Image (cartoon, rainbow, N blue to C red):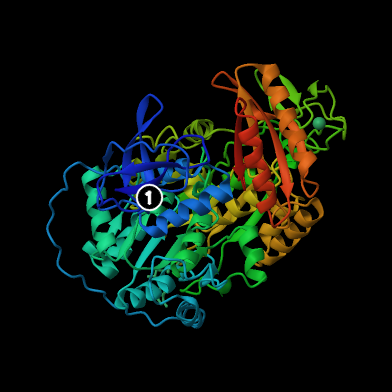
Amino acid sequence: MKYISVFLPIPVYNDFYYSCEDDSIKQGCRVKVPFGKTSRTGFAVKVFDKKPATKYELKKIKSIIDNPPVLTPELLRLSKEISRYYVVPRGMALAAMLSASLTPLKRKPKFEILPADTNIKSQYKLNQDQSAAVDAIKKEISLKGSGKGSGKGSGNGSGKKSARCLLHGVTYSGKTEVYMRVMSELIDDGKQVLVLVPEIAITAQLVDRLKERFGKTAVGVWHSKIARGKKMKYMEFLSKGKMDILIGPRSAVFVPFKKLGAIIIEEEQDPLYKQDNAPSYDARWVAEKRCEITGAGLILSSATPRLETIYRAKRGDFKYMPLSQRVDKSKSPKIELVDMKREHSEREKSGILSRRIIEKLENNLTSNRQVILFINRRGYTSSVICSDCGKALKCGKCNMPYAYHAGKAQMECHWCGRKRPVPLKCPYCSGETYNFRGSGTQKVEEVLYKFYPEAKIARMDLDTISKKGSVEKIFNDFKNGKYDILIGTSLLTKGWDFSNVGLVGVINSDLGLMSPDFRAAEKIYLTLMQVTGRTGRGKYRGEVVVQTYNPNHYALKMMLSDNPNIFYNKELNVRKTAGFPPFRDIIGITVSGKNQSKVSSGIDLCKKYILKRDNNTDVLGPAKAAIYKLRGNYRKCLLLKVGKDNTGIKKILKGMILKYKTININIDVDPQTMP
Ligand code: ADP
Ligand code: ZN
């Protein structure tokens, strides 16, 4: 007889003991257990030979679901860390980890053993920056990697940090080539590599390159919708060490490996790495933890790293490796700002497109170059911006911009709840017209068709990409010259390689700049820098025209500089003064429910609970969530600014959840968007 400790995927923090007659039970198995009047699937995290000290009679489990276990010791340990850091019950963390990776089949599928792969060496001679980076990463990994590849944490207990590197260079500076060289050596050494990407649908180019270099069968391509049989095959190959590389989106961070040598995170700034719904883990955080546990190296790669990552690199948390120029030494594009306030005042009938963009557009079309028009639309709540002075109307009490609610045609402060009609005259300049939101992709397409009925125009946004494979098709067709103009939203920012794009036009650069999100300036700066990366890869220098109502805002002005540190330093100062990340961490708390007054009293109770127990935490709010009523539920939230060591506050939050069991409380640690 064995005894096991089991976590269940329910909102309860503790584990449950059961007995098990089958002595073959192992740690990491899933088990069917009786629970109350029903039975449930749980995760066996520990196995004991002796009955644990408890006065209760232990119930027997009903059955063992998988043997061998589906959860390696490493993943079990990871679930514990996730549970602690994100304040989620361990059973829920385990369930999320597994649902991301697998739902085991009853019978094992049969599959053939694949022939060994070739690891083709690249022909390029690396430039100076590249070879310096390759050497530094190799040194870092061999110095700090465990080398033992053991599942049990070698990084954490000893206090030794695993190797962490940041590759920072504009698109085309040779970052991919750098980490592929490192991968090649790791693989020769018998190690495996996980490559995380924000979104697999737009990663075809990278997948092709990896397959070309390391062999088709060495590379597994993961995403949540691949067939179960294929997932099983990958899992089996990876855990037996028969596959060298897995590339996939955030859920791939939970796939078990035999000998993980490194995790590479492409486009490390991408918000898609954070899961929206509970458990709202951040794959970047999980990857770092996993590397600490296994001794694998962590390599971040980006043209535009997050401010928080840059800050950590400056403090020595990451080995910082800048790549200073494009491999073909081509010049970065010429960027100019167009002041849309002036545009409106100087033109009788001005539209979405400024005269400057129209002029450049025509030049490029006549010389057979392609054009990308980018529309910034990233789920910001819209604010009220005066078309004359460009300022956003703010709540006098909170000094935060009002959010505009089109349905009720009024402004509302999300922080104090104050509501106001839109004033007839702008309080700053007495202007009488306002901008509430930018123009959508469809509108731009319509305008273009009217101007250029001959042009072949493609549009890429959520409406056009819902079909599988359509993103790739649009990108490929554009690359092959089937279209003259490509209009689109944030998908366009991701690293696709176009060689004939002469102009990138940004229609509404500052949408969201005034939103009540402290990361607004950073998000806009990074997004704009990424779109500029889509031009200028060919023989001629690319051009970028950015339309804005805020030509004097630092996030826009600093785009004109070649040196991103000017922006990063400025923004760091802003954050320091305001006490936001990376100087303090933040935690969002949302209470939701059908009954408005219960939601209000619930969030008040939470605030009181926290203030009474912790005086290192600043509590902002309660405020209504940006979308106050969602699917019939009212939502109110708090924003906590906590100290860098936040184990204390997390214990308090756990206590709060346990105390207020009847209140529906959601905790978002390190939220990437404001509630
Ligand atoms: P990034 O990842 O920074 O966008 P890549 O590594 O993809 O840059 O390099 C851009 C292009 O230049 C790729 O087609 C790559 O094959 C090529 N390349 C990379 N390094 C070199 C080099 N040292 N010499 C010549 N070509 C290179
Ligand atoms: Zn207010």
* Residue depicted at 63% across the width and 43% down the height: 355
Q: Quadrant of residue 20?
A: top left
Say which of 627 and 124 sits in front: 627
x, y (%) of residue 199?
Answer: 42, 49
Dot 1: what SS? helix
* Residue depicted at 45% across the width and 35% down the height: 462
Numbered circles on residues, count: 1
- View quadrant of ligand 2: top right
Look at the image and tell me in which quarter the C terminus lies: top right
Does 133 appear above or below 594? below
Does 364 appear above or below 35? below
Residue 674 can be seen in this image: no
Say which of 480 and 325 sits in front: 325
In the image: residue 389, left or right of residue 250: right
* Callout 1 amino acid: Ile
Mark 1 residue crowding within 10 angstroms, few (<14) / some (14–19) / many (20+): some
Q: Quadrant of residue 564?
A: bottom right
x, y (%) of residue 340?
Answer: 70, 41
Residue 389 can be seen in this image: yes
Question: Mark 1 sits on what residue?
Answer: 200
In the image: residue 158, left or right of residue 508: left
Say which of 113 and 326 sits in front: 113
In the image: residue 463, left or right of residue 631: left
In the image: residue 559, left or right of residue 444: right
x, y (%) of residue 569?
Answer: 73, 63
